[in-house]
Amino acid sequence: MKTLVIVSHPSIETSVINKRWVEELSKYPEKYTVHDLAKVYPDGNIDVHKEQKLVESHGNLILQFPIYWFNCPPLLKKWLDDVLTYGWAYGSNGDKLKNRKVALGVTAGIKIEDYSKNGRYRYTLDEVLVPFEMTFKYCNADYRSFFAFYGEEHKPSASEVSKSAQDYVNFIDQI
């Protein structure tokens, strides 16, 4: 089954890394479905049934987003709140994510050193992303961690951008 990549970026057209990742994934339509929430739901009104059916029709699930105030963008949070419902994603009959491989593809504007115990923010990206891990474990999914690109605000070179896209695809293929 194809992998569903849920993309949430408040301004993908001005993005460097997320935009490039989407371009790379789009080269393989037989392997990935790229689902850009901002394009599908510009008004923020999510069609829960449609989203649940989309998830059900795919194998693995990837959430791709920039770290946004040390979390995900608001539309992705709304997607999680609306789509992962009791009786569908969790609860006594909620099994639609059970054993489904789930991972994150994230970009962080700041450098990796800033995400460390001794760094500027004192927490690792692993720690910042714990709520996602807990959410998917609660839904009995097979959470597979994350792929990250650090330092986007420091204007990465074209070769760094290209390499990150290839590495991201490799990461997804190995989950």
Image: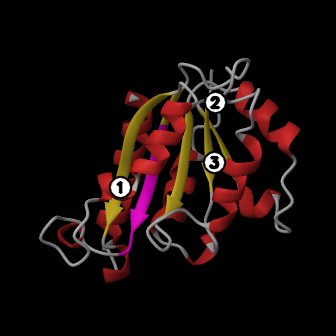
Q: Nearer the viewer, residue 173 or 63?
A: 63
In primary-sequence order, the first of circles 3 and 1 is 3
Q: Position of residue 13 (x, y in %)?
A: 63, 74
Cα separation, mark 1 vs mark 2, equals 24 Å
Is-magenta flag for residue 107? yes
Residue at 32% in and 54% down = 127
Whether residue 163 is visible here, answered yes or no, is no
Q: Residues within 10 Å of mark 1 (few under 14, many from 20)?
A: many
Label 3 secondary element: strand
Query: Which quadrant would the N terminus be assigned to in this image?
Result: top right
Q: Amino acid at mark 2?
A: Glu
Residue on which disc 3 sits: 6
147 displayed left or right of 138:
left
Marks 1 & 2, CB-CB < 8 Å contact: no
Q: Position of residue 101 (x, y in %)?
A: 50, 27
Cα separation, mark 3 vs mark 1, equals 16 Å
Residue at 56% in and 55% down = 23
Label 2 secondary element: loop
Q: Position of residue 52 (x, y in %)?
A: 78, 34
Residue on which disc 2 sits: 30
Residue at 44% in and 41% down = 133
